[in-house]
Image (cartoon, rainbow, N blue to C red):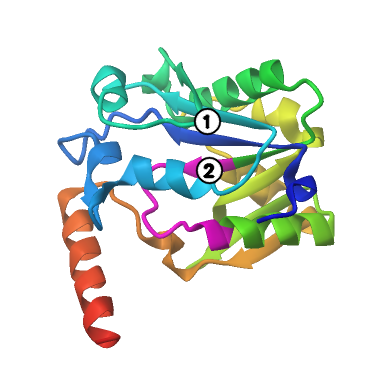
Amino acid sequence: MSDSKDIRRIGVVILAAGGSSRLGQPKQLIKFQNKSLIQNIIDQSQAFTFASYVLVMGAHAAKIQKSIEPGNFNVIINENWAEGIASSIRKGVKYSLEIDPELEHILFLLSDQPFVTSELIHELVKTHRQQEKEITGCKYQDTVGVPAIFTKRLFQELSMLRGDRGARVLIKKYPDTLAVVPFDLGSIDVDIPEDYNKLINFSEKAAKKFK
C-alpha cells in the first residue's frame, strides 16, 4: 500500500508465543514455500508502514530468534505464554501503546496461518477504514477471526482477556460493530502433524491446478 496515511495510526502485533505441544516442534519455524511460517508473516506485514510493529514470542523464543529476520518488528518475550493466547494479546497491546500512545487501531496476526498475504492485509485495512467499525475480521468456514483489526475503544477489553481465550471472544461479543473480509484459506493452520501434511498436499494440488 503506497498511501501510508491509511495506516498511520494502526499498529501490528504478531502472536507467536505458543508452545506447539501437539505438533512436537515449533510451528513458527515450519517451512512452507521455502520460508518459515513466522518469517512469512513478518515479511507480509512489512509491506506496510505501520505505526508500530510488535512480535510476541514465548516458547522456543531463543531458537526462533536465531532463525528469523525481524526487520521493523520489536521482539518482546511473553514469559507467561503457557497461560494461553490471552497473555500474548495483553502483552502486545501494552507494548504497542508504549511505542505509540496515540495508537488508534491494532491489527493482530498469527504466525501459523500460511496463506496470509500483503493483499489480504491491504483489504483488511481498506475495509476497516471505509466501514468504520470497531472490529474488522476475517471470515473462514463458519466463523470470523484473526487476522483482525480492533479500534482503541476495545484495547482495555483486549487487555483483560485471560487464559486461552483469544480476540474471537470480542468478535462474538460485538457482532453489530463488525466488518468482515472473506478469507477462505484462513482455516488452514498448523496445530498437529496431520495439519502440516494437509498443508503440503493442498499446496501441491493448487500448484498442479495452475500448470
Please say if 153 is above or below 99. below
Magenta range: 108-120
Mark 1 element type: loop
Residue under label 1 = 72
Label 1–label 2 contact, CB within 8 A: yes
Instruction: Name the foreground residue: 65 vs 16.
Output: 65
Res 122 label: none
Decide if residue 204 is on the left or right side of residue 156: left
Q: CA distance from mark 1 to mark 2?
A: 7 Å
Taking the magenta stretch, the answer to whether it contains residue 41 is no
Q: Is residue 84 left or right of residue 9?
A: left
Mark 2 Cα-neighbour bin, 10 Å: few <14, some 14–19, many ≥20: some
On the image, the x and y values in percent for residue 203 come to 25, 69
For marks 1 and 2 on the same chain, the one whose residue lies earlier in the sequence: 2
Name the residue beneath numbered marker 2: 46
On whether residue 111 falls in the magenta region, the answer is yes
Question: Amino acid under label 2?
Answer: Gln
Quadrant housing the N terminus: bottom right
